[in-house]
Image (cartoon, helix red, strand yellow):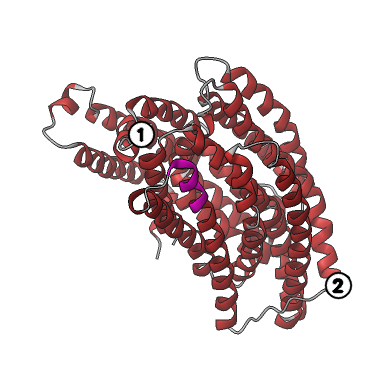
Amino acid sequence: MTLASRVLGLAREMAFGYFFGISTQLSEFRIAFQIPNLTRRLFGEGAITSSFIPVFAKCRIAEGDEAAKRLAGGVLTLVVAILTAILVITEIGLLLAQWNTSRPVVYLTIILLPYMVLICATAILAGVLNSLHRFAAPAIAPILLNVIMISATWLGGSWMKLEPNEHLRLIAYSVLVAGILQVAIQYFWLRAIDFRIVPNMNWRSPYVRRVVMLILPMIVGVSAIQLNTFVDSIIAFLLVEDGKGPATLGYAQYLGHLPLGVFSTAIATAIFPLLSQNVAERDEVGFVKSLDSGLRTSLFIAIPSAVGLIMIAPLLVRLLYQRGEFTPDDSERVVTALICYCLGLWAYALQQVLVRGYYAKENMKTPVRISLAMVGLNFILNVILVQTVLREAGVALATAITASLQVVLLAILMKENVCELSWRLIAWSGLKACVAAALMGGVLWIMGEDSALGAGLPIGDWTRLLVSVGIGAIVYAVAARILKCDELNILLRK
């Protein structure tokens, strides 16, 4: 399901590239869409679900399903009430601001903002399903979003032939439709497995209070991170002379995070309820084993993904995006940003698993403190690097640098705050993955368009891409087998 979602997300980005290129209008849409997405990460799959799932697991084990249902209903009602109040106040402010500006970002934000309530409700319901070891419905939600956005993009561009601003307005409304359907799917899936959640205002429940107490420090850290992400887009929009920075970064970030979303996010999502259950059952050996396996498997996937993406980046970007309004100059900018994102791919993957180890032990403060420390560094690097020849790619490079440092700090403090892992074995696994990825990269370089062999291959670009990906995967798998990488067996285990 996650793979299908990411493939459809790629199709959505290809549609954006065809109809909008890296236009300033698309940059403003990305900024407007980022606001409800930041709220989703803050109140939805970020702070709320990370605080909610461990407490939900303990409540269900200690008091049974009925108590767990009441807890879920109370948290859902509380979050929706808070977000609705924020939504009303913010919408009033935006409507007043619209009197003084005609920027598309303002009216697009007005349209998209209600999505934050819908997607956060979806995230809470998805957290319940994940805790019940039901992963299909939560993974279907982003599939719906992508299908509806692609349909709206095609409808507005090919059939209705709308001008860019009106076209993006239609896409914004389609997001709201998708949000309603996302909530409905999670809700009815829970009913289908006879786990009906009834909204309630029992906010004085000890378990609800525990969720609130855990979420407060996380809101500080997560809000700082997400605000920093939003500021990154503003910096790219204002400091890059043509205002096309956010549009460029959107294309590059999606490709750079594609393997992360397909595999690493899936691993982290699946492992979190298991870690929470290990803690609830006081199974320290199981906890360490699960966390160790998640970290090593994430490295095993992220390292070759980064090397492979860097090697095929020019061909990949040209084939996927370069058509319609998307020009060769646009491709060069996206390739540069993509390579910069790839440098931190290993760190993004480990970060997701490490942070969930802290959250499962209900240690929210340590990741928050580290995140806050990274905010200032990231901002400084952004301002410095964007004003060099890197332009918007400087944002991507700053993100990779700070993510790498953040993972190092999380690993150093793991023993004191969570558990003791065998970092020597994890590092050894990572080193073997690097060797296998280097062999793969060498083969891809030999096959590249600029090499004598690559230039002599009488094949089309799409065939070259598919052959490169296939041979690269085979070389990496064979090298991993020769190097006796246990992670290969973990992935292939049935």
Magenta residues, dominant SS class = helix
Residue 209 lies, in percent from the top left, at 85, 65
Can residue 281 be seen here? The reply is no
Asked if the magenta segment contains residue 164, the reply would be yes
Residue for point 88% across, 70% down: 204
User: Which disc, if any, is residue 205?
Assistant: 2
Q: Which residue is mark 1?
A: 326
Which type of secondary structure does the marked residue at label 1 adopt? loop
Which type of secondary structure does the marked residue at label 2 adopt? loop
Tell whether 310 sits left or right of 283.
Answer: left
Callout 2 amino acid = Ser
- N-term mark: 1 or 2: 2
Residue sitting at the far top: 388
Tell whether 146 sits left or right of 173.
Answer: left
- The residue nearer to you, when weighing 47 against 88, is 88
The quadrant where residue 59 appears:
bottom right
Q: How many marks?
A: 2
- The residue nearer to you, when weighing 360 against 251, is 251
306 in relation to 91, above or below: above
Residue for point 29% across, 33% down: 315
Q: Residues within 10 Å of mark 1 (few under 14, many from 20)?
A: many
Asked if the magenta segment contains residue 478, the reply would be no
Distance from the alpha carbon under mark 1 to that under mark 2: 54 Å
- The residue nearer to you, when weighing 22 against 278, is 22
Tell whether 464 sits left or right of 91.
Answer: left
| Quarter the N terminus occupies | bottom left
Residue for point 57% across, 62% down: 179
Residues shaded magenta = 163-170
253 in relation to 275, above or below: above
Which of the two marks, 1 or 2, is nearer to us in this view? 1
Residue sitting at the far right: 204
Tell whether 292 sits left or right of 4.
Answer: right
